[in-house]
Image (cartoon, rainbow, N blue to C red):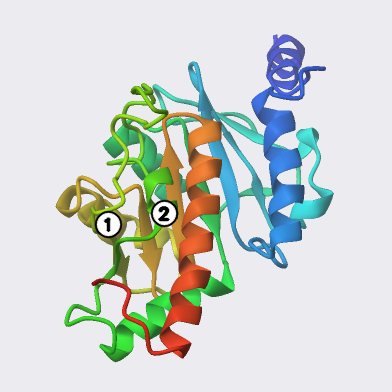
Amino acid sequence: MADTQNASAEALIKSEDPKHPANLICSLCRQFYTFGWVTGTGGGISIRHEDHVFLAPSGVEKELMQPENIFVMDWASKEYIRRPLALKPSACTPLFLAAFTQRDARACIHTHSQWAVLVTLLCETGQQGPDPGVFAMNKIEQIKGISRGGAGSMEVAEGGRKLGNLGYFDTMQIPIIENTAHEEDLRESLEEAIVKWPETCAVLVKRHGVYVWGKNVTQAKTQAESLDYLFQLAVEMHKLGLKWVS
């Protein structure tokens, strides 16, 4: 019986399809490593697929990750049905689950991007707005790549505009929460931010990084890329004395 269960668990991460969650997590982590998002062993991604949640392990270098390193959780019970020997699940797991539960997201990305960290520090100074607990920006074209809520409509209107996304004249607002000594302790404040800011697709963590989610892997990835572009642009604008919200 145990051998049958083990074989079934192993089958969950075996596939020739590059878009299978176990393969996709590894390839995306390698890509994120080249962006500087997951330097060292920090950051990562989780994918909710059908009845399972696929999670990267803790302490494994992201550019060297292999499918056999991946944890698999049963979505309904939240119990692990595949646990790689000698590895621990990501400390980000409670945060990923919060995005899946609160927003019905299917993918959540966590980065330690330097631009995300710098934006939280600039907000902390109060030089770009009166509220240090939110990063706000408008009238920048890339904002149109951000969906309302992070798991909204992907329907395309005439002219190519995505319904459910922010517009050029909308003010994008990303809440910022305080960091904690242990990542799993961020869950409560992250969930509070998700509830308080129903249109956000991400939560920044002060002096730490950002969590970004989407209705699928593609949306989560493109929004993480768009946000990182906007974070970097915000830092450069600040150097030039330009305001993020006009």
Please state which amino acid type lies under the numbered disc 1.
Glu
Numbered badge on residue 188:
1
User: What percent of the width, then of the height, locates residue 101?
Assistant: 32, 35
- 157 or 95: nearer the viewer: 157
- 130 or 67: nearer the viewer: 130
Which residue is at a point 49% across and 40% down the rendered structure image?
220
- The quarter in which the N terminus is drawn is top right
Which residue is at a point 38% across and 89% down the rendered structure image?
241
- Per the model, the C-alpha gap separating discs 2 and 1 is 33 Å
User: Farthest front residue?
Assistant: 159
Vertical relation: 159 (above or below) 140: above
Please state which amino acid type lies under the numbered disc 2.
Glu
Q: Local crowd at mark 1 within 10 Å, few (<14), some, or many (≥20)? A: few
- The quarter in which the C terminus is drawn is bottom left
User: What percent of the width, then of the height, locates residue 242?
Assistant: 36, 83
Question: Label 2 belongs to which residue?
Answer: 141
Which residue is at a point 29% across and 46% down the rendered structure image?
167
- Which type of secondary structure does the marked residue at label 2 adopt? helix
Ranked by sequence position, the earlier of labels 2 and 1 is 2
Q: Quadrant of residue 176?
A: bottom left
User: What percent of the width, then of the height, locates residue 202?
Assistant: 37, 53
Vertical relation: 196 (above or below) 50: below
Q: Give the label, 2 or 1, closer to the camera.
A: 2
- 232 or 63: nearer the viewer: 232
On the question of residue 37 being in view, the answer is yes
User: What percent of the width, then of the height, locates residue 82?
Assistant: 65, 29
